Amino acid sequence: MIFLIVLLAIALLVTGFEMFLVLGIPALATKAIFYSSMPDLAFIQKTLGGINHTTLLAIPFFIFAAQLMGSGQIASRLTGLVKALVGHARGGMGYTVIGGSMAFGSVSGSAPATVAAMGKMVYPEMRAVGFSDRFSLGLLVASAETALLIPPSITFIIYGWMTGSSIARLFAGGLAVGLVLGLAFAILVRWEAKRSGVKPLKRTTGLEKLQAVRSAGWALGMPAIILGGIYGGVFTPTEAAAVSVVYAILVEAFVYKNLSFSKLVDLTEKSAISTATIFILLALGGVLSFFVTLAQVPTHISDFLAAIEAGPITFLLVVNICFLIAGMFIDPNSALLILVPPLFPVAMALGIDPIHFGMVVTLNIGMGMITPPFGLDIFVASSTLNKPVMDIIKGVWPFIVANVVVLLIITYVPSISLFIPNLIFGQ
């Protein structure tokens, strides 16, 4: 059964169907052919019941917050602060891109939103200081990947909803993994700056740094409220998402005076469209996952691994390959919905920590978003900066190599992913 469903999904994907159809048609076909005795009402209840979860309320709130900040002053002021602190170093604009992407990711949780917001702000300055066009484009696209890891992350929220894992622990683990990935990119920036003779920016004085901190004071309040509130036990990740929207509206409208009522309505509409798209995928993916479980696919995978005497090391290698390939062709949410249900129970049976497994999965998905031929962030950057897709693809290869190295380290050194969660919440 599952083989036929997979073939149908692949055929739909290759022929260019939208992802909601790639997930929905196989789910309907499975119900009609193999579970025809299931009442239609039960099928509908399973579809809608899967997304009737308070945890998922964080997604529309974080999407709305990202729209507000990306179109306002919060994102640019956070980037300006990073530039004031590290811009004077050799390759400082490169570090600014990495740090700015982390800062924007810390309040948006979305890699495509980070590409769109950061691209127009920093690409011209990257070129002005001497970075090549190819390297500048590659760094912009790759750095946005950290938004999937630096909390809050929409990917972590979906993974936590699917697996029952603690979202707060996932956020804590993602902080460490995101910093490791950012460090790997910073090493590439340092090497490229030295090789190309990139000019450092003018060194900022202590007074100028202080002014940058003051200018970004209200913007810094966003990550402080989100992360401080979650880790301090003041509110849940879902409540933090709602607070972030209220805070962003108040700051952009009354402090920075950059948000009119008409602009707010427009941003609300865009956020609603993005939210609807994600929730349709979640609903259909949830049904497909239900049928995968009924077909005992995780049990079959476990039996196969036992038969060939494969342990956690081999299993994680297979997971990396599956998610990397999936990420090259489909969006991250769809990759999660398709692959996590059959693989997560096997990971648990092999004794792999769910937080560690979440880090491996998310890092794979992030790498898939910058990997040709259909990495999503590549096309977002092409549209945002009006650059040919092939130019961006040529620039991302060094960062894909760095990604692979970090992925192997994170995969086989679980303590990196688990150190901060265990430190904050205990083992």
Image (cartoon, rainbow, N blue to C red):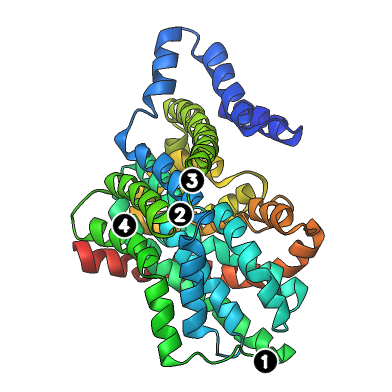
Q: Tag 3 or tag 1, which sits nearer the N-term?
A: 1
Q: Tag 2 or tag 4, which sits nearer the N-term?
A: 2
Query: Label 1, label 2: how many angstroms apart (C-alpha)?
Result: 32 Å
Please state if 380 lies on the left or on the right of 35 as rendered. right
**Does residue 317 appear in the picture of this structure?**
no
394 to 5, vertically: above or below:
below
> Where in the figure is residue 104, as x and y percent of width and height?
48, 62
**Does residue 142 appear in the picture of this structure?**
yes
Mark 3 lies on residue = 260
Query: Label 3, label 2: how many angstroms apart (C-alpha)?
Result: 21 Å
Mark 3: amino acid: Ser
> Where in the figure is residue 153, as x and y percent of width and height?
42, 53
Element at label 1:
helix
Please state if 167 lies on the left or on the right of 124 as rendered. left
Mark 4: amino acid: Ile
Mark 2 lies on residue = 108
Q: In which quarter of the image is residue 42?
A: top left
Element at label 2:
helix
Mark 1 lies on residue = 194
